Amino acid sequence: MQYRRALTPGASYFFTVNLADRKQRFLVDYIGQLRQSVRKVKQTHPFTIDAMVILPDHLHAIWTLPECDSDYSNRWSRIKANFSRNLSVNDNISASRSKKGERGIWQRRFWEHLIRDENDFNRHVDYIHINPVKHGYVSQCQDWPYSSFHRYVRKGLLMPDWAGKVEAAELKGWGERVW
């Protein structure tokens, strides 16, 4: 099935990519394999990671693609396939996934949003960085190790105590309407 997607060469996109079984922790338990999969795809299909957060069962990212390229679907497909191939876990594979040669680790689809302008970009970066707090994994962004938040701090774009100490309940619904 062909999904309707925004395809603008050289644009920036916000993504949400989920594991099929949202109770799993594969993305943080196997963070090395995920990082390697992303690096491998970037070598052959370049893109810039503007912001990213990895949570146990899903991730959010903003990518900017090369000037004449809009094929983010192929990149995500390759990242997912590389990660899945290098994962040594027993997963329950449905008949339909088995028939298509899929492991069943990832949800087939992902969500994308074409970034419209600088304000839209900044709101999505904030959403990415606050996400571990929103989900209750930490009370401060700086305490989550799998986030581009630390790169933003190193570059002086954010202070280490950005957003302060927050309880997850205070963020219920926060950022759900950034797009």
Image (cartoon, grey):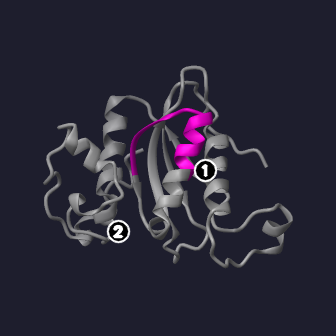
In the picture, the disc for residue 135 is 2
Under circle 1, the secondary element is helix
Q: In which quarter of the image is the C terminus?
A: top left
Residue corresponding to mark 1? 79
Residue beneath the point at 81% across and 62% down: 101
Q: Can residue 109 be seen in this view?
A: no
Q: In which quarter of the view is residue 82 placed? A: bottom right
Q: Earlier in the sequence, mark 2 or mark 1?
A: 1
In the displayed structure, would residue 102 be above or below residue 75?
Answer: below
Q: Position of residue 76 (x, y in %)?
A: 61, 47
Residue lying at the far right of the rendered structure = 99
Q: Which amino acid does label 1 sit on?
A: Ile
Q: Is residue 3 left or right of residue 37?
A: right
> Where is residue 77 drawn, in percent x and y?
66, 49
Residue 151 at x, y percent in the picture:
28, 44
Residue at figure coordinates x 43%, y 31% from the top left: 116
Q: Residue at x 37, y 47 (%)?
A: 178
- Residues in magenta, as a range: 37-52
Q: Is residue 81 left or right of residue 32?
A: right
Q: Which residue is drawn at 66% across and 48% down?
A: 78
